[in-house]
Image (cartoon, rainbow, N blue to C red):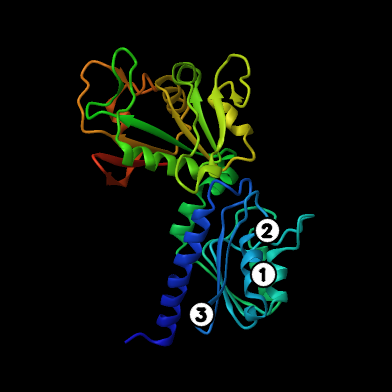
Amino acid sequence: MTDGRGQRAADDDRWMVEAVALGERARGRTAPNPNVGCVIVRDGEVVGRGATAPGGRPHAEAVALAEAGERARHATLYTSLEPCAHRSERGPTCAALIAEHGVVRVVAAIEDPDPRTAGEGADALRTAGVEVIVGPLAAEAAYSLSGYLTRLSLGRPRITLKLALSIDGKIALPSGESKWITGEDARANVHLERAHADMILVGRGTYLADQPRLDVRLPGLEDWSPRRALLTRGDAVEGWEILHSPQDVFGLHDVNDLLVEGGSATATAFLAADLVDRILVYRAPILVGEGKSSFGYIGLDAIADAHGRWRSAGGVTLGIDRLEAYERVR
């Protein structure tokens, strides 16, 4: 039998799952703001839902409160990130809005590391008489918000490297032909990853060889195509942002999630600079033999030095292909 405290904790987890999912759907559209999700519950019924709007405003809490209206009074608000406490010309603080709407309890998955809030949002709510709980589903929320959290902690976006490989680790035939290594299901998954990125980057060689569009071609998500960037020491290209070196990512202050798609030289440059946080390997059930490798020398001179740098983050079958995810251990 579950006691009252256990039931409340179970309910908190249940509603936080929905809040985190709402925030995840907004990822790739809110930078430089975080992709937050919010659910307002009164008497066991959802009365308001919200996610950070495209461009970062209004915040998720404001969207959910607007939907709830008077029904927010005496309700519990679930949010994947601590409500903001810093004033902006674009609107009042979420902490103030929540208190004004008569919410009696706020459950936040994680504290906002932004020094302008960093605990002050929770303190402001408590001062206003609102009960505040921080911690339910913290790991899940932090993963969804990892682009924002990475930018605040490391001063750059979270960087995902996407690779489409054969069983034997080749990205193309000796001639350079690589279209298509993977099947339709894997390619659709790549487009979903694009939709959740703020910016997508390729190298000059890939640009010249493939003239890639780098857009999102999934029904209903066409408008979610990210900004396009080119890694090159050459001249500017119309419609593309230029990074002259991987270190230029530290200047991307309005990008939370950066997706690096190609090619071998670009992947090598980012790995050698230790700037990759996540690798997505789309592995096709084909053997290429002699062909182009995924990348070259990345600074390792002993196998022992390679161990412990990456951990498996799971995998899934996508039609005929297999997606393997790996995360950098830092």
Q: State if disc 2 and disc 3 touch (CB < 8 Å).
A: no
Q: In the drawing, does residue 205 fall left or right of residue 252?
A: left
Q: Amino acid at mark 3?
A: Glu
- The residue that label 1 is drawn on is 66
Q: Which residue is mark 3?
A: 45
Q: Residue at x 48, y 16 (%)?
A: 208
Which three-letter amino acid code belongs to the residue tagged 2? Pro
Q: Earlier in the sequence, mark 3 or mark 2?
A: 3
Q: Position of residue 124 (x, y in %)?
A: 70, 70
- Determine whether label 2 and label 1 are within 8 Å by CB: yes
Residue at the spot 33% in from the left edge and 36% down from the top edge: 281
Alpha carbon distance from label 3 to label 1: 16 Å
Residue 110 as seen in the image, left or right of residue 73: left
Residue located beneath label 2 in the image: 58
Q: Which mark is residue 180?
A: none
Marks 2 and 1 sit apart, C-alpha to C-alpha, by 10 Å
> Where in the figure is residue 68, as x and y percent of width and height?
62, 74
Q: Quadrant of residue 266?
A: top left
Between 111 and 208, the one lying in front of the other is 208
Counting other residues with Cα less than 10 Å from the Cα at mark 2, is it few (<14), some (14-19), or many (20 or more)?
Answer: some
**Quarter that holds the C terminus:** top left
